[in-house]
Image (cartoon, rainbow, N blue to C red):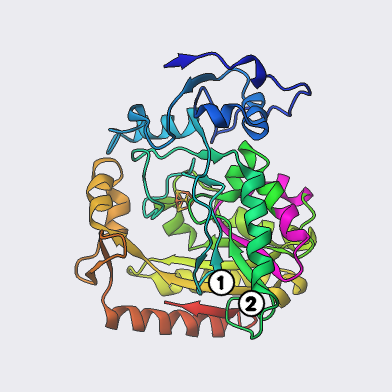
Amino acid sequence: MAAAPPPSAVPTAPAPVPSPTRLLDVRTVYAEPAALDSARGREVLARFPGAEVVEVSSHWKIPELHGNEGNVDRWVRVKTETLVLGVKKSLTARANGRSADWIAPSTANGCAMACAYCYVPRQKGYANPITVFTNIEQITGYLRRHVARQGVKAEPDQVDPVSWVYDIGENSDCSVDALVSDNVADLVATFRGLPTAKASFATKYVNRQLLDLDPQGRTRIRFSLMPDADSRVVDVRTSRVAERIDAVDDFVEAGYEVHLNLSPVVLREGWEADWAQLLRQLDDTLSPAAKAQAAAEVILLTHNRDLHQVNLGWHPKAEDLLWRPDLQQPKRSQNGQWNVRYRNDVKRAGVDRLRALVAAHAPWLRIRYAF
Ligand code: SF4
């Protein structure tokens, strides 16, 4: 049902209206009534005053967003022109132990970018545009209580020697989410006041507005990196790799901890030379301060059979890199999907080789984990 925003949706003070970017030019906002009626929902709508608001009973049930598999023009248009506002119902933090100690409840899901290997679940069709959860105070309140219950971290682990680390961006890219709402700003502010914990998120987008959030060391940004030659094929709509590298020093100076995700590592002819070049670029570019605090995750590509089929319809060149049955084996994932990943022997050799490249070209870069 199409509806104009209710009178209560008009904020008293004008919110900053971002000019349309390449990534977002929002024309339609699907919204649950409770989300429309919330302060955060009203703020988001005020950022996109020209958008038509369409009320939906549940942010999970929006049939218009489905059925765009393999139609990349339509898919990118949906990502650019559509937002969803919802209320996050179940609030739980899940134990993790790799990127973070805990996965925080999401404050958004979906993404305006379109990486060919993206593993973020596509619950709103293949376009999967950004959904903003508007009950941010409930979510930050839950996080404060969860952090308090953990007490002080008793023993260092690979995630962090001292702090409990909460991944706040499992289902989205927080740098882009911050173009849409103040949820990320509120999370950074929440963790600024939690001396036993840190927020953390991986990103492929450089949003310099985040430099003003004063994280005071309590938020860790993990810039994802891969050789530019791969990224230009598979990282669709993201910031270029050189721009991400150039941003590292600025984010360190602004009070973020900045780690690097060397991921996904795509094995193909010439991969070692290109990764060596990327590591030398890091060594040449990063300041001593950035190097002193840096650490990395190394993650070899995992792909997916269904995604492979969809990608063949719009981006077969990406599949030349990602789909390598000669090197890969199927693996049933926790959610029952058939993933493919490099065979154990191939993967072990790849991880060993990448570790050796880091030791040779960026010896200051501690590897937190590699798999
Ligand atoms: S930036 Fe992350 S969430 Fe967005 S499409 Fe790429 S992999 Fe998926």
Quadrant of the drawing holding the C terminus = bottom left
Q: Position of residue 188 (x, y in %)?
A: 71, 54
Which residue is painted at 48% across and 63% down in the image? 227
Q: CA distance from mark 2 to mark 1?
A: 9 Å
Task: Give amino acid for label 2.
Answer: Asp
Task: Give amino acid for label 1.
Answer: Asp
Which residue is painted at 68% across and 59% down in the image? 144
Figure label count: 2
Q: Nearer the viewer, mark 2 or mark 1?
A: 1
Marks 2/1 in contact by CB < 8 Å: the verdict is yes
Determine whether, in the image, residue 299 is placed left or right of residue 187: left
**Earlier sequence position, callout 2 versus callout 1:** 1
Which residue is painted at 42% across and 30% down in the image? 78
Q: Badge 1 local density, few (<14 within 10 Å), some, or many (20+)?
A: many
147 or 156: which is nearer to us? Answer: 147
Q: Position of residue 140 (x, y in %)?
A: 66, 52
278 or 128: which is nearer to us? Answer: 128
Q: Secondary structure at mark 2?
A: loop
In the image, residue 207 sits, relative to residue 200, either above or below, namely above
Quadrant of the rendered image containing residue 242? bottom right
Q: Secondary structure at mark 1?
A: loop
Quadrant of the rendered image containing residue 64? top left
Q: Position of residue 129 (x, y in %)?
A: 45, 37
Q: Position of residue 143 (x, y in %)?
A: 64, 58
Determine whether the beta carbon of the residue marked 2 sits less than 8 angstroms from the nearest atom of ligand 1: no
Residue 36 circle label: none
Q: Which residue is mark 2?
A: 160
Residue 101 circle label: 1
Residue closest to the far left: 326
Determine whether, in the image, residue 238 is placed left or right of residue 13: left
**Span highlighted in magenta in the image:** 188-212
